[in-house]
Image (cartoon, helix red, strand yellow):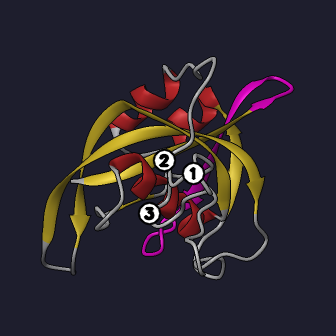
Amino acid sequence: MQYGALCWRPGSGGIEVLLITSRDTGRWVIPKGWPMPGLSPEAAAAQEAWEEAGVQGVMNPLCIGRYGYQKCLSAEASVPCAVAVYGLRVEDLAKSFPEVKERRRKWFPLAEAATLVAEPELQTIIAQFIPPLMGRAAPIAGDDDDDGLPVLRATGKRKGH
């Protein structure tokens, strides 16, 4: 199981989706990755969005869909993966982020983004995406404010880093 972020923003012609290139083949994908100890699924998706695309924004805690794909481990081996997808409204794109030299990122209208990803179930998730009226941000593990409750802003950075 992996967790992914559908990074979106309102654009002049409607909702736009941020896609990134995969490191191995250069095909268009969404940020995604493995579960992380201490992080909820949506917080792990927000962390992946930060590391892979430099995204900071507001994460909705509700899964908007799931899709499957074959993750290539080597030329001879692959493993089936399921990805739970969470919507992340982008508020800022950093110029510097952990994988900046390994990936490209680009905004696309919803309909175009849906045609650019390879996985049919992800195509459907993107094509049918309707942003929530109000989302709540996913806390990043270790972040808290003065009242001891998790900070609800998904910054992609952990406290003390």
Q: Quadrant of the C terminus?
A: bottom right
Residue 32 as seen in the image, left or right of residue 76: right
Residue corresponding to mark 3: 141
Amino acid tagged 3: Ala
Q: Nearer the viewer, residue 68 or 1?
A: 1
Residue corresponding to mark 2: 5
Residue 147, label in figure: 1
Q: Nearer the viewer, residue 54 or 73?
A: 54
Q: Tell which circle, 3 or 1, labels the residue nearer the N-terminal end.
A: 3
SS type, badge 2: strand
The location of residue 13, given as percent across then percent down, is 81, 23
The location of residue 19, given as percent across then percent down, is 59, 51
Residues rendered magenta in the picture = 10-28
Determine if the magenta segment contains residue 11. Answer: yes
User: In front: mark 1 or mark 2?
Assistant: 1
User: In front: mark 3 or mark 2?
Assistant: 3
Q: CA distance from mark 3 to mark 2?
A: 17 Å
Q: Tell which circle, 1 or 2, labels the residue nearer the N-terminal end.
A: 2
SS type, badge 3: loop
> Does 73 appear above or below 94?
below
Q: CA distance from mark 3 to mark 1?
A: 16 Å
Determine if the magenta segment contains residue 103. Answer: no
Q: CA distance from mark 1 to mark 2?
A: 28 Å
| Quarter of the figure with residue 112 | top right
Q: Tell which circle, 3 or 2, labels the residue nearer the N-terminal end.
A: 2
Residue at position x 56%, y 34% in the image: 136
